[in-house]
Image (cartoon, coloured by chain):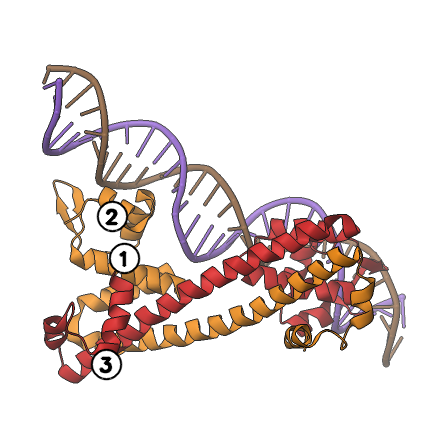
Chain colours: A orange, B red, C brown, D purple
Amino acid sequence: MYSIGQVSEMFHLPISTIRYYDREGLFPGIGRQSGKRVFSEREIEALRVIECLKVSGLEIKDIKQFMEWTQEGAATYAQRKQLFEVRKKAVEAEMLELQKTLDMLRYKCWYYETAIADGNEDRINAMLPDRLPEKIQKLYDNVHK
Amino acid sequence: MYSIGQVSEMFHLPISTIRYYDREGLFPGIGRQSGKRVFSEREIEALRVIECLKVSGLEIKDIKQFMEWTQEGAATYAQRKQLFEVRKKAVEAEMLELQKTLDMLRYKCWYYETAIADGNEDRINAMLPDRLPEKIQKLYDNVHK
DNA sequence: GTACAACATGAACCTGACTTCAGGTCAAGC
DNA sequence: GCTTGACCTGAAGTCAGGTTCATGTTGTAC
């Protein structure tokens, strides 16, 4: 059993954020002791799931929906599973986009390294768009296709 | 040379967004023809960089800063290179976090698959926290450490 | 019994990134 | 010359996800 302050430290979240989550219904049925929130293992796991779903791109109101489903027991197993399947696909797609972004960043790093070495962009411009060093050409093509 | 409408289609961005970017200074020195914005290869490449930097987590005002650097020529090569290096590290860190998120999502998918098969969570709870199937145990440990 | 830290509340405020709105310009086709 | 479509503007509105504020309560330490 933890106080809001302890949870704040455990998850490196401001207290105001945790209270905001509670206000938004992310801890349905959280316990109270003389007015103070009591975080049990249930709420701790809820927070782990909240972090996960947030990173996956889910909005707070949809996380609330999920938390309501967990209150309804076995009847909502299927919905809950589907939610995680959908999030899994979203994260996989996001990773592909980040991979492409990384290629652009790597290309730009090479670009400015070269520009710094040359003192200008003339030599690079002469190589564009299809006479770049092999590895760099791949990055360039991947992003400028 | 493209009109704002053509650029909107090319990048699947609302016209209002492109105008907003211009208002925020993301196309310094963009051309005009009888009042209308003219997007040349310069602005097209700018938009590719904008998308990249946005995905990497950079804010609009910092992208504006970068665009100003590109106006200043060779004097800012070093700053620009460093910006991309920093973004590269940020994206690499983000990918690590997404990888962890994916492990949580995979664990939860297994969890609900199993709960659906069993009709309840009793058998799963009996396996927790360290008697899960080997592959699942790894996901679980990775997330609940 | 009073000071203090840690909690509580509702309401207002903030920020970033857009979007919408009301009204105006411009070139092309009829 | 009028309509139409594509463009323009500044100002205001929206939305998510918090944060801040003013004020109040509670349990413990001195």
Q: Mark 1 or mark 2, which is nearer the start of the sequence? A: 2
Which picture quadrant has residue A50?
Answer: bottom left
- Seen in the picture, residue A14 relative to A105 is either above or below; the reply is above
Report the chain holding disc 1. Answer: A
| Separation (CA) of disc 2 from disc 3 | 30 Å
**Three-letter amino acid code of the residue under disc 3:** Glu
In this figure, which residue is indicated by the disc labeled 3? B113
Q: What label sits on residue A7 in the rendered view?
A: 2
- Seen in the picture, residue A33 relative to B34 is either above or below; the reply is above
| Separation (CA) of disc 3 from disc 1 | 22 Å
**Three-letter amino acid code of the residue under disc 1:** Leu
**Three-letter amino acid code of the residue under disc 2:** Val
Q: Which residue is pictured at 36% across the width and 59% down the height?
A: A60
Report the chain holding disc 2. Answer: A
Is the residue under label 1 in contact with that under label 2 (CB below 8 Å)?
yes
Q: Which residue is pictured at 68% across the width and 69% down the height?
A: B8
Is disc 1 surrounded by few (<14), some (14 to 19) or many (20+) residues within 10 Å?
A: some
Describe the element under mark 3 as helix, strand or loop. Answer: helix
Report the chain holding disc 3. Answer: B
In this figure, which residue is indicated by the disc labeled 1? A47
